[in-house]
Amino acid sequence: GPKVLQIPSHQIIDMGQMVTLNCDPVSNHLYFYWYKQILGQQMEFLVNFYNGKVMEKSKLFKDQFSVERPDGSYFTLKIQPTALEDSAVYFCASSWDWGDYAEQFFGPGTRLTVL
Amino acid sequence: GDSVTQTEGQVALSEEDFLTIHCNYSASGYPTLFWYVQYPGEGPQLLFRASRDKEKGSSRGFEATYDKGTTSFHLRKASVQESDSAVYYCALSVGNNRIFFGDGTQLVVKP
C-alpha cells in the first residue's frame, strides 16, 4: 500500500538545540499531519496542514514548533529550541482528502531523544 | 473532551483462541470509530472503521460493531494467528481529521 517515509528514524539532541523531523508523504496526498507519542502514553494529535497553511493545531503544538512543506518536498516539523518534554516518537501522516473517510497513512515514526 | 479507553494493556493468547479487546469512547459529537494495527517498526495502519450506530466494520477476520448505546467498539476475532501479534489501537474522529487514539493493546499470540 501507500507508504509514508520519515527521516531520521532516531535523533538524539541536546536540550536547547534545534531539530527538524522530515516526512515524505504519499505522493498525491494533499493533507499532512503530525502526532506525538510519549513513551507509554497515547498518540496525540499535534497539527494538520493543507495548501501551505496550518489548518488546526492542538495545545501540544507549542510556539517552539513549526511546520512547512516548501515546494512539495518534505513535510517538516521543526522544534526550536527543544526541551526535555519534547522527547517522544513523532508520527507523520498524510491523506488524499479531508473528513473521516479520508484514510490517514502513517509513517514509522521518528524517535526524538532530548538530553 | 473526546477520548478512547482500551481496557486491556496486553493480551496473551494461543493460536486459534478467540480475541476480544474492549474499547469505550467519549465524544462531543457523533464520531467515526476506527481500529488501527501497528507492527514493529511501522506506523499504525487502518484496520477498518464504522461511522453509524450498529454498523459493523471488518477486515482480515477482525470485526467490531459500533454501539452508541454503550459507547463501545470492541474488537473481536474468532481464531487468532501468530501473525496477528501487534499493537491494536481503538480511535475516533469527529470529522475534523483529528484522530484520538486509545492507549493501545499489545497482542501476543503464541504458536
Image (cartoon, rainbow, N blue to C red):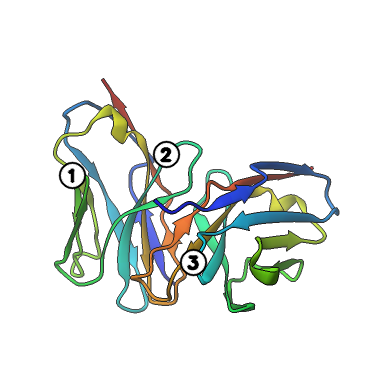
Quarter holding the C terminus of chain B is: top left
Calculate the distance from the C-alpha at mark 3 to the C-alpha at mark 2.
Answer: 25 Å
Q: Earlier in the sequence, mark 1 or mark 2?
A: 2
Q: Are marks 3 and 1 in contact (CB under 8 Å)?
A: no
User: Which residue corresponds to the image point at 40% horizontal and 47% vertical from the top-left?
Assistant: B104
| Marks 3/1 same chain | no
Calculate the distance from the C-alpha at mark 1 to the C-alpha at mark 2.
Answer: 17 Å
**Hey, what amino acid is under mark 2?**
Tyr
Q: Is residue A111 left or right of residue A26?
A: right
Q: Chain of mark 3?
A: A
Q: Residues within 10 Å of mark 1 (few under 14, many from 20)?
A: few
Quarter of the rendering containing residue B71: bottom left
**Hey, what amino acid is under mark 1?**
Gly
The x and y percentages for residue A32 are 55, 67
- The relative height of residue B89 versus residue B80 in the rendered view (above or below) is below
Q: Is residue A37 left or right of residue A81?
A: left
Q: Are marks 3 and 2 in contact (CB under 8 Å)?
A: no
Quickly name the residue at label 1. B61
Quickly name the residue at label 2. B39
Label number found at residue A28: 3
The x and y percentages for residue B39 are 42, 39
User: Which residue corresponds to the image point at 28% horizontal and 27% vertical from the top-left?
Assistant: B82
Under tag 2, what secondary structure? loop
Viewer-side label of 3, 2? 3
Quarter of the rendering containing residue A61: bottom right
